[in-house]
Image (tube, grey):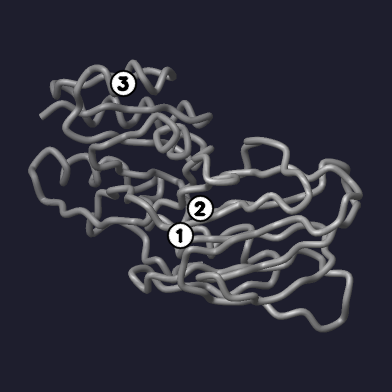
Amino acid sequence: MRIGVVPGEDSSTVRRIEDALSDATRSVDQDVQAVLDADPTAVVAVGESAVIDLVGAGVSVPVLPVDAGAGLESVPGENVESAIEDMLSGDWTTAARPLLSASVEGEHVADALFDATLVTREPARISEYAVRANGDSVAQFRADAVVTATPAGSRGYARDAGGPVVQPGSGVLSVVPVAPFAIHVDDWVLSGPVTLSVERDEDAVELLADDRDICPIEPHEAVELAVDGSFEVVSLDSSRSFFDE
């Protein structure tokens, strides 16, 4: 069994992972592509940023997230030795988490594990957004941003903005206005695909995928967000529950 390791900023956790792997065949590199090119059976990703890098690189093997948040039922750093022991003994299963495919005017531009967001480039500026689901109009509102989250992402930015926590495996997305310019604005749990658009030619708006800049969005361009593919997570007894705080 070959284990790849994508380090995060916590070097002490990475050293503990390397020690726990001991004689196991492993590839440890900040370069995600170098880790994947070593043809690992599974990859250990330390921190959320490492997980996002793997998604961007198109990882196709199971990933063990370490200290990457409850949205992925990641392993806490203090349990990493027992987690590695379970992996090496084959005492693990996998769970599929949906990926969000983002397309602008029909052209695929990004994949996201957690969320996709339309937001004005300048801080503290608002724009007007429209939401459609399966071709039906849902709402139009003015806000700082609008975020569409998978169940994994519903534990993050979308929740901070007041959205619901969505159960894994439910097959739905949450759509949440961020700091809406009105007292009463709903958020929604929708089956995809979800289409977002900017309705006014005011401040410049950017599409983010997992909090990373993707491209500018012009007024009335259709940004379609649909579940397409999955991210395979290593599941262990030491993994956090999705509903843990």
Q: Position of residue 169 (x, y in %)?
A: 33, 69
Q: Residue 41 occupies which quadrant of the picture?
A: top left
User: In the drawing, what numbered circle is on residue 207?
Assistant: none
Q: Where does label 3 land, which residue?
A: 35
Q: Where does label 2 land, which residue?
A: 114
Q: Position of residue 31 (x, y in %)?
A: 42, 18
Q: In the displayed structure, would residue 174 be above or below residue 97?
A: below
Q: Residue 210 occupies which quadrant of the picture?
A: top right
Q: Where does label 1 land, which residue?
A: 152
Query: Which residue does the image show at 28% across and 48% down from the upper left?
Result: 232
Marks 3 and 1, the one that precedes in the sequence:
3
Query: Which residue does the image show at 46% across and 52% down from the upper left?
Result: 100
Asked if disc 3 and disc 1 are in contact, CB closer than 8 Å, the reply is no
Determine whether, in the image, residue 79 is placed left or right of residue 191: left
Determine whether, in the image, residue 44 is placed left or right of residue 91: right
Identify which amino acid the numbered label 3 is placed on: Val
Identify which amino acid the numbered label 1 is placed on: Ala
Q: CA distance from mark 3 to mark 1?
A: 24 Å
Classify 10 Å Cα crowding around label 2: few (below 14), some (14-19), many (20 and above): many
